[in-house]
Amino acid sequence: MESLLRQQAVERFGDAQRWRECQDTSKLPAGRAATPQEIADVVAFLASARASYMSGTIVTVDSGRSYRS
């Protein structure tokens, strides 16, 4: 996401360092994007024995955004 925002910042401002200004987090229920650690935690759980009974399930990690759409 940061990479895409950096590209947008270059297009809009001519400066990739201004990428945070391109974020529109108003539509995200948590008010921010997920951190890499938050996504990794879900992946680690799904790959663990604790998720052994899960099958055929799509896990959406979007802070509830798809529910609101």
Image (cartoon, rainbow, N blue to C red):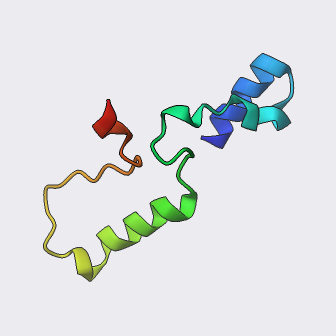
Location of residue 10 in the rendering, given as x and y in whole percent from the top left corner: 79, 24
Q: Quadrant of the C terminus?
A: top left
Q: In which quadrant of the rendered view does residue 42 lie?
A: bottom left
Position of 37 compared to 64: left or right?
right
Q: Quadrant of the N terminus?
A: top right
Query: Count of labels shown?
Result: 0
Horizontal and vertical percent position of residue 58: 23, 51
Report the side of 63 relative to 66 (left or right).
right
Q: Decide: is 4 above or below 59.
A: above
Residue 18 sits in quarter: top right
Q: Residue at x 60, y 31 (%)?
A: 24
Nearest the eye: 2 or 30: 30
**Horizontal side of residue 13 vs 31, given as left or right:** right
20 in relation to 52, above or below = above
Residue 16 on image: x %, y %: 81, 33
In the image, 65 versus 41, the foreground residue is 65
Q: Residue at x 28, y 53 (%)?
A: 59
Residue reaching furthest to the top = 12
Q: Which residue lies at the image location 13% right of the left edge and 56% below the top edge?
A: 56
Q: Residue at x 49, y 48 (%)?
A: 30
Position of residue 45 measured from the top left corner of the image (x, y, whole percent)? 34, 72
